[in-house]
Amino acid sequence: MIDEYKTLKSSSEGLFKDKGSKFFAYAFPIQSEEDVRFYLETVKTEHPKARHACYAYKLGIDETNFRANDDGEPSGSAGKPILNTITSFDLTDTFVVVIRYFGGTLLGVPGLINAYKEATKEALSVAEIETKTINSIVKISYDFDQTNALMQMVRKLELTVKEQTYENRCGIILDVRNSYIEKIKEELKEYWSLEIEML
């Protein structure tokens, strides 16, 4: 079960030059396509004379929400190398836009592919990358006399308690890393009166 992923902790920048052309890369952590639009417009506003603003992004861990845009460059010469570089860094929830200023000499498709890839690498190489876990919210209902055993498990697995109640039937709501759910069930299997519910 995949329960962690890597993304950017904050934005970063990179620059690659080739035959007079300058490729300014800007990398951002994102949560949505709205973030993509916001950062794209922000960068375009900062570079009104730029010839191209090519970009790519990946969202989520299932590898299905991604996009690459060549913004007028030859097909496959800009957006795809940016996307491939994001993938090579094993990142998601990441947006990279590369602004190109033409230097007077045509680079050809291989030169463009290399330039967009290298600019993206420059930005991502200096980025602060963090690993995040994918968690679920779990509610456990239990009898009061099971409190000690339950709290020992919470400490052992270093779980985060979101809420706890002591009424007719006690309850605890935990923020649990997905790979720990089976561990919780294993730890608590001898307590038949426990009820474990995914919220």
Image (cartoon, rainbow, N blue to C red):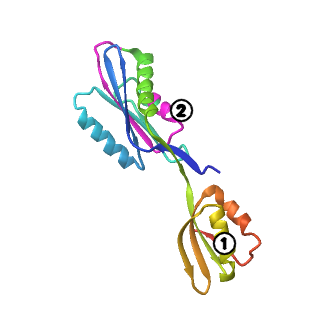
Q: Which residues are magenta?
A: 81-106
Percent across and percent down for residue 64 are 52, 44
Disc 1 marks a residue whose amino acid type is Leu
Disc 2 marks a residue whose amino acid type is Ser
75 and 17: which is toward the camera:
17
Q: Which tag is nearer the camera, tag 2 or tag 1?
A: 1
Left or right of residue 115, residue 92 in this image: right
**Residue placed furthest toward the left:** 48
Q: Is residue 76 visible?
A: no
Establish if 146 lies above or below 102: below
Tell me the number on the disc at residue 150: 1
Left or right of residue 106, residue 185 in this image: right
Percent across and percent down for residue 84 are 50, 31
Q: Is residue 48 visible?
A: yes
Tell me the number on the disc at residue 188: none
Label 2 element class: helix
Percent across and percent down for residue 81 are 46, 28
- Residue at 69%, 78% (x, y): give it: 146
**Residue placed furthest toward the right:** 190
Establish if 52 lies above or below 18: below
Q: Residue beneath label 2, please?
A: 88
